Image: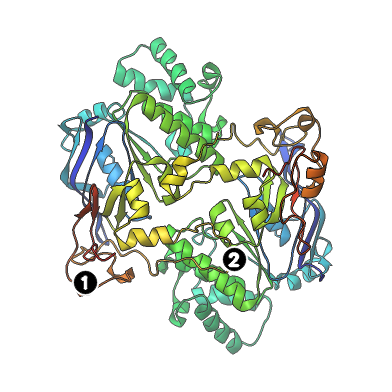
Amino acid sequence: MTEPLVRVRDLRVHFPVRRGLLRRQVGSVRAVDGIAFEIREGETLGLVGESGCGKSTTGRALLQLQPATSGAVTFQGENITEMKASGLRTTRRHMQMIFQDPYASLNPRHTVGRIIREPLDIHSIGTATDRATRVTELLALVGLDANHADRYPHEFSGGQRQRVGIARALATSPRLIVADEPISALDVSIQAQIVNLLSDLKQELGLTYLVIAHDLSMVRHISDRVAVMYLGRIVEIGSKADVFDRPLHPYTRALLAAMPIADPEREAARAHTPLEGDVPSPADPPSGCHFHPRCPLATEVCRREYPAVGTVEAAVDSVGPAVDKAPGATAASGPPHLVACHHAVWER
Amino acid sequence: MGTVLEVRDLVTRFHTSQGVVHAVNGISYSLDSGESLAIVGESGSGKTVAALSLMGLVPPPGRVESGEVILGGREILGLSGKEWRNVRGSEISMVFQDPMTSLNPVLTVGYQLTEGLRRHMGLSRSEARTEAVRLVDLVGIPNGVQRLASYPHEFSGGQRQRVMIAMALACKPAVLIADEPTTALDVTIQDQIVRLMKELQAELGMGIVWITHDLALVAGLADRVAVMYAGSIVEEATVADLYRRARHPYTLGLLNSLPDGDHAVSSRLEAIEGRPPDLRERFARCPFVDRCSHAIERCSTEKPVLESVGEKHTSACWRREDL
C-alpha cells in the first residue's frame, strides 16, 4: 500500500488561558487533544462535530496555519510541523484552504482576477502572461466568465464568491484542499451547485479533500470516510458506510438521530430521545471519557478513564460472543473502523 | 380549533435610495390554534420581512403598504404604537434566530423575563418572580432561582434560546412566530429545542409560524408548509403532500437538491441553476422563470397566481397540472 498523502499522529493544539495583571497562564483550552488519522490520495475525509469540538482547528493545524502544540502532521512524506518557514511556504503550494464565509475571506478592495492571481504571485509561478491565462482558465473551471476577473467581490452573489474562493485555492494546482464548512453560509439551492462543483473538480484534477462540516447530510454525500470529533478528540472514524450505517459510538448515534430527515412519514415514524445537556467547555473537559455526562451508556469506568481507540473487532471481542461482528468491518481494503468507547457494541 | 391568525394580501416594501425593494408581494395565509405552519424560503425570499410585518417591527425604510392581519378577530396593522405594545408579546410573540443579539447583555435574565410579565399581566414584582421561576423550569433550565440572577453571556447558546422561548411564552400568546430559532445551534441542541417547542405547543395550544430555510427540519415539525420565493408564496400544502406531491418547480428543485442519503460517492445533486432575482423588479412574469426547466412562453409574460391543485394544496405555476 502506498503512503497516505496526509498522516496525522497524536496532534495537539492547546490555547493558553491567561488571567490577571501579569497575564499569567491559568489553564489551557485543549482544542485538539491527541488525534490521529490518515487521508489517502484522491480520498475525501469528512470531519464532523459540533461547534467547539476542534474540527476547524484541526483543519488549520493540518496546513500549519495554526502551529501544533505537539504531534506530527506528515504531508507527502514530510513532517510539516518541523519545517522552517521557507520550506513550509513551498509545501503550502500543494495544500490550500476553502473558507466558510465567502464574504469575509475575499479582499473587497481587490478585483477577482487579482484575488485568484495572488497565490501565483506569492509562489512566483509563471510569467505575467502565464498568470493571466491561468486566471482565465481557473474562472472557467469554477463556472465563472473570463470578464468576471475585472469585477469586485461585492458584485457577486454568495455562491459566485464561493466559486472565486475555490478558484483561488486551485490556482497553485494543490494536491490537498481543506474545505472548512464550504457551503454552510450559502442558500439551499446554491449549496447543491457548490457540492457538485467540488466533486467535479475532484474527479477532473484528482484532488484530495478534508471537508469540515456540521451538516451531516452533506458530509454523507461527499465523503469516502468520516471522522467524528467531540471535545478535541476523534471518537469514531471509518468508511462512510461504517459511520452512517453501523455507528458504534453513542455520540455518533446521537448525532445521526438528531439529524432531521426530509420525509414527514419517516420523521414521524422514528422515536428517539434527544441527547441531554450541552457540550462542555474544552477548557475544563469532564474526566475520563469526555462524553460520559451526556452518554446513555456511561458507567463507572467511563468517568475514570478515557477509552483507548480500538477497532470494531476489539470492541466486539471484549463484550463476548453474544454480539455479532459488524459486517464489512473486516474487509481487507482500506483503514479500519475505529471507535473510542468502553461500550461500543455492534447491534444487529 | 379556530383560526387565530389570518393574513390577507400583505404587501411590504423597502423604499431605498437604490429603488423600491418589493420584499413581500401580497401573501395570504391562515393559522389555527395549536397548528404549525412552516414558511420556507431562501435568504431574500421575504419570509423574515413577512414575519416582522405581523409584529409591527419592519425596520425603516421598510413599510407595510397594504393588506390585513387579523389576530384573534381583530385587525392589527392599523394599530397605534401604544396599542402595538399591548398586542406584541402578549397576543403574538416572536423567537429570533440569534438569542445573543436579542437579549440585553447588561440586564439579568430574570429582569428581562419579569419585565414582560409585569407590563402585560400586571403582576407585582414578587408574583412576576415566581412566574419567571416557573417559566424557566417549563423550558428545562435547572436551578431557576439562581439562573434568573445570571446574565445572558453566562448561558450556553441552547440555554439562551430556552430563555428566549420562556420570554416569548410568558404571556401565553395565541400565536408564536419562530424565525429560524435553531439555525445558530448545533444539531443535538436543535433537536432539544424543537422537541421542547412541540411539547409546549401541545401543552399551551398556541399556533406557531416556523420560518426556516431547512426543508429537512420542516418535515418533522410542521402541519402545513408555505414555500416563498421572491416575496410571494408559490406553493402551500400539508406537509405530507408537499414532500410527496410537490406541484411547483421551485419546491421540486429544493427537495431534489437535498442529499437523499444514498451512498454513491460520485452521484450528483440536482442543483437549481442560477440565483434568485433582484427584488427591485415588480414582477409581471413568473419570478422563477429564469431558473425553471419547465418554463413556457406564458411564464415570461404573465405572473401565475396561487390556484388549487388538490385539497388544501395550492400552487402558483402555469404548468401546475403537468408536473
Compared across the picture, whether B272 is left or right of A33 comes to left
Q: What subunit carries mark 2? A: B
Up-down relation of residue A204 to residue A281 (above or below): below
Quadrant the C terminus of chain B occupies: bottom left
x and y, in percent, of residue B256 in the image: 42, 61
Q: Which kind of residue does numbered mark 2 sit on?
A: Val
Give me the residue at 28% from left, 69% from top. Answer: B289
Asked where in the image residue A238 lies, by quadrant, the reply is: bottom right
What residue is pinned by disc 2? Answer: B265
Mark 2–mark 1 contact, CB under 8 Å?
Answer: no
Q: Secondary structure at mark 2?
A: loop
Compared across the picture, whether B96 is left or right of A314 comes to left
x and y, in percent, of residue A178 in the image: 65, 63
What residue is pinned by disc 1? Answer: B300
Most foreground residue, A347 or A216:
A347
Q: What subunit carries mark 1? A: B
Give me the residue at 75% from left, 71% from top. Answer: A91
Q: Secondary structure at mark 1?
A: helix
Q: Nearer the viewer, mark 2 or mark 1?
A: 2
Asked where in the image residue B181 lies, by quadrant, the reply is: top left
